[in-house]
Image (tube, rainbow, N blue to C red):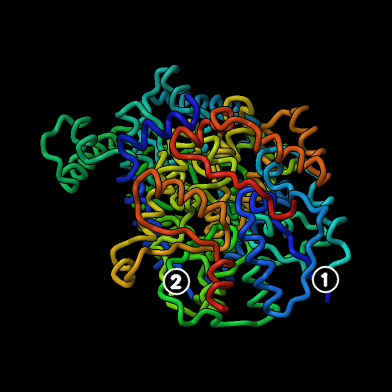
Amino acid sequence: MKHQELAIKFYKEKGPKHDKALWAIRQKRDKAIKEVKEWEILRQKASEIKDYVIENLQKLVDEFIKNAKNEGIEVYFAKNAKEHNEIVLKLLNEINAKKVVKSKSMLTEECGLNEFLAQNNIEVIDTDLGERIVQLRKEKPSHIVLPAIHTTKEDVAKILNETNTDPTYLTRKMRELLRKEFLSADAGISGTNFLVANKGYAVVCTNEGNADLGAILPPLHIISVGIEKIVPDMKDLGLFLRMLARNATGQAITTYSTIFGKKENGKRVIILVDNGRFERLNTKFKETLKCIRCSACLTTCPVFRRSGGHSYRYIIPGPIGSLLAPLKDKNEYKDLPFACTLCGSCEMICPVKIPFSKQLREMRKYVTKENFIIKIAEKSMHSATMFKLFSKIIRLTPKPLLEKAISEWSKYKALPAIPKERFIK
Amino acid sequence: MKTALFVPCYINELYPDIARDTAILLRNLGVNLEIPLNQTCCGQPFLNSGYESSLPQNFDEIFKKYDYIISPSSSCVATIREAEINSSNKTFELIEFLHDILQLKNLIKEHPPLILHNSCHSLRSLLEASPSELNIPYFNKIKNVLGCKILEAKRDECCGFGGVFSVKEGFMSYVIGKSKLEDLLNEDNLKKIKNTPIITGVDMSCLMHLESIAKKENINAEFKHISSLLLKGIK
C-alpha cells in the first residue's frame, strides 16, 4: 500500500490523538529552544560544522579511526549493510554469544541486523522502552526518537498480558523484565549519536540509560554507526549536545549522555558504516548527510502527525525519510516526496538547516519520469496565446470530466466555480 | 520606478476580481502600475510536481524592464524568488511591497476583527511573519499593514492545500484543512467577533481549499483575499 492509503487507515484509527501527542512535544520543544536566546546562532554554527564534515568526510573518518584505535577501541569499516552484519556476526561468534541487548540504533535498522542475527540463532533484545514495545508487537519503530508513539497504554498492557493499564505500572514491569535480559546478555550493541574525530570517542544519548547498561555489563560492546555522525572535536560536541535533546523532546539534555572510549572490563568495537553515504556526497542530496536524527522534522510535519510513521514504510519516516527512502529504492518509495505540502516547517525546525523544501522538490524530480504530454503543456505555457486556448478548453470541458481529472480533490470537496471572464483576457 | 503586476495564472482563471482589486488598490496608492498582457505562469505547478520547467526564465524575459514586480500570491512570489533568476529580488508579494517598499501601515485600522490565515509560503519562505519554529522576535507584516484587530490560529501550521498534494492525497489534505479551520475559528477568536467571521490571507489558493471544506462541513465563514479587504477598507 502507498502512503495515501496507509495514511487514511492510520488517521481513522489514531490520527487525531497522534497529532495531539506530537504537537504537545513540538510545544515543549518550542519552549526549550526559546530559553536559549542564541538558538538561531547555534543553528547557523551547527549547519556550518556539518557542511565542513560532509566536505571533509574521508579525512575525518581517517582521523577518527586513528584516534579510536589509539584510545583502545577496535574499529572496522563496513562498505554496506551486508558487510556490517557479517562483522557483527563474526564478533559475536568469537565469544559464542547467544543473546544480545541492543539499544536504539537507526543504523542497525537500516542494515536489517535484528533479522540477520535471528536467522543466525542469536537472540536480540531491544532495550529502549519504545523499541521493546514495537519489537514485542513485531513492528518497526514509527518515529526515530519516539518509536512507539503510535501505540496506546492499552496496546502495551496487551503485549505484556496485563490488565492494569497504568503507564507507571507498565513501565516498571518492563524495567523488571529488561533488567533480567541485561544481566544475562553476552554482548551489547548500540548506535551512537556523535563520533568525536580528534579524540576517537563515541557519544551515546539516551533517557533510560539502557545503552549504558548494554555497554558496561556484558564483556563485548559493539557500536554500529553511519559515518556522517562524525563531528570534528569536543567543542563541536558541546554545541550539538545543547541542541539535540532540546529540538527532539524539549529537554535541556538527555538524561544520559555518555562519552565512550576504551572499555575497561572487556572489548569495545566500533563499526563505521558507509552503505551508500560516500556515494551520496556526489549527488544533489548530499545535504541529507547533515542530519543528526533529532526527529524534529517528523514531529512538526502536519502530514506525519496525522498519517503516522508506518505510512512511510521506510525505517526513517517523515520529511527526512522522504529524502532517504527513494535513494534506497526509487520505485518503491516514489510516493513519499509527494506526501508533503511543502509547508517548510521541517526546514525551519532543522537544527542543521537542511534545505528541505528544495531537497524535497529535487527528490520529486528524481522519482518522476519525464512525461511527453507534460513537456508539451509546459512549453505551451510559455505563450500567453496558448495559455488562453488552454483556458478556453477548460471552460468548455464538462464539469464531471474536470472532477474526474482531479478525482482526489473532488472526492472530498467541490471544485471552485470557474468565472466566465479572465482578468487578462 | 517601473512597476508591473504579476497576475498568478490561477488568480487570472479563477479569481479575476482579486487581480482587479490589487491593480486598483496599487493605483489608488499612487503606484504607476503596468500589467504586461503576455504574462503566463511562474512554473510552480511543474516544479512542485517533479518536472523541469523554464517558465521562471520565461517570466524573467516578460518582466525584465521592470524595477518592481508585485503579485497577490505568496507561493508564486516564492517560486520566483527561489528560482534564483534576475527577477528574484525585485518580485514582491503585495503585502511585502506595501510594508517594505511603500512603508505603509494601519491601512484599515477601523475594520472589525479579521481572522488571518498565515500561508506557509508567506510565513516560512518570504518571512512576512515570524514562524513559530524559529527563536526570533514576533512580527507580522500583514498585521502591521492592516492595522485592525487580527485574530490568528493557535498553531501556525499548514492548511493542507499544498498544490499537488491536494490532488495526490485528497483525504490528508482535507483533514489537515479541517483542523486548520477549527483552529482559525477557535472559541477565543469567535468570542471577539460579532458578525460572520471573515478569514483572510495573502494566498487565495489556501483560502480556496479552506472555503471548499467550510462549504462541505457547513461551517459559517467568509473567505476574502487581503487585496479585496484593503481596497474596500481604504476607500
Q: Residue at x 45, y 67 (%)?
A: A33
**Residue A308 location, x and y as percent?**
40, 39
Helix or strand or loop: what does disc 1 sit on?
loop
Whether discs 2 and 1 lie on one chain: the answer is: no
Please identify the residue farthest to the front as the structure is shown.
Answer: A420
**Quarter-of-image position of residue A180:** top left
**Quarter-of-image position of residue A143:** top left
Helix or strand or loop: what does disc 2 sit on?
helix
The residue singled out by tag 1 in the image is: B67
Q: Residue at x 28, y 64 (%)?
A: B187
Q: Callout 2, which amino acid? A: Lys
Q: Looking at the rendering, in which quadrant would you find the N terminus of chain B? A: bottom right
Does residue B231 appear in the picture of this structure?
yes
**Residue A15 location, x and y as percent?**
34, 41
The residue singled out by tag 2 in the image is: A34
**Residue A188 location, x and y as percent?**
41, 37
- Using the image as rendered, state which of residue A237 and residue A374 is in the foreground: A374
Asked if residue A289 lies left or right of residue A190, the reply is right
Please tell me whether residue B224 is drawn above or below residue B54 in the rendered image: below
Does residue A250 appear in the picture of this structure?
no
| Chain to which mark 2 belongs | A
**CA neighbours of label 2 inside 10 A, class few (<14), some (14 to 19), many (20+):** some
